[in-house]
Image (spheres, helix red, strand yellow):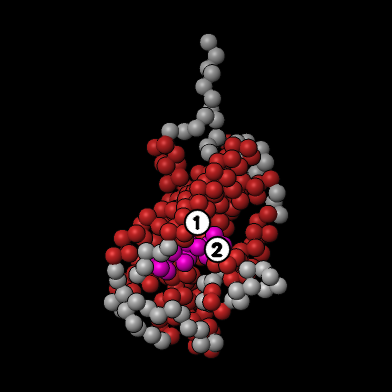
Amino acid sequence: MADTTDVRAPLPLKQQWTLVNAFGQRDLKAKFNGTLLGWVWSLVVPLATLGIYTLIFGGLFKMEPPQLASRHAGIGVFAVWLFAGLTLWSFFQNSINAGISGLLSAGGLLQKVYFPAYAPVIGAGLAIGIQSAIEVGLLLVVLAALGNIGWTWLLIPLFLAVLVVFVQSVAVILAVWNIHVRDLAQLVGVILQLMFYATPIIYVVTIVPESWHSIPLQGIITHMPVAEFIGVFRSLCYDLSPGSVQSWGLCIAWAAAAFVGARAVYRRWGQDLGERI
């Protein structure tokens, strides 16, 4: 009797996680392989970026962040406020870029043996997530040293879970589409650069006009997906506020929509990528 087992049937959850973890470990080992400082670079690069933006916007342009709950003030507080935004943005941007390149680099293996195409994408996100977790830990240590600590920190793990679902779902969508339209990676790079300056990361959203030619500009910027996530994160760790129900609802809605979109895209375009890579 012929074997009717479908080699492309979904793997059990445990096997899926084992595969994702294997890709994540591969990316972690390759990330700083052969470098002198190794994992120290995972903090040097973001801290250098933070220092540049702090000097330019906090020192030169005198950008004033919302007052810290512990009542501290000054350029150091702007650096903390900025670091909170940069940490989330870096996770979003790096996960998408790593997911796209991770699927492409797994093409040779995918041509030889079948595995879910989302595995290397999420594996790359796992590697980026570990670095981002270190940055979040450093941020919380600094805030605790400033006496800016409260019960809202207990909500941070829940928030990060919602964020991970959103980011990894978007990464899967774009990584799969990029296999079919190879110009997409370059387009995504341009869009991400524009999004960085459109999102209130290095500036306070209140400096944006409420309306421009009858367009509710400030409202649009405030409610962009990444802006919503950054706003809630800053509320939890910086303002020591749980954030509004509306903001939480929008973050969950964006994550749910991205997850549903990722499932649909994978089922429609992600099943037979080995021949296209």
* Residue 213 pos. (x, y %): 71, 72
Q: Which residue is mark 2?
A: 223
- Residue shown at the point (67%, 73%) measured from the top left: 212
* Residue 11 pos. (x, y %): 47, 33
* Residue 231 pos. (x, y %): 47, 67
Queried whether the magenta region covers residue 233, the answer comes back as: yes
Main SS, magenta residues:
helix
Label 1: element kind: helix
* Residue 94 pos. (x, y %): 53, 61
Q: Which residue is most to the top?
A: 1
The answer to whether any part of residue 145 appears in the image is no
Queried whether the magenta region covers residue 73, the answer comes back as: no
Point out the stretch of residues depicted in magenta: 223-236
Q: Is residue 150 left or right of residue 85?
A: left
Q: Which residue is mark 1?
A: 250
Residue contact at pointers 2 and 1, CB within 8 angstroms: yes
Q: Which quarter of the picture shows residue 152?
A: bottom left
Q: Which quarter of the picture shows residue 193?
A: bottom right
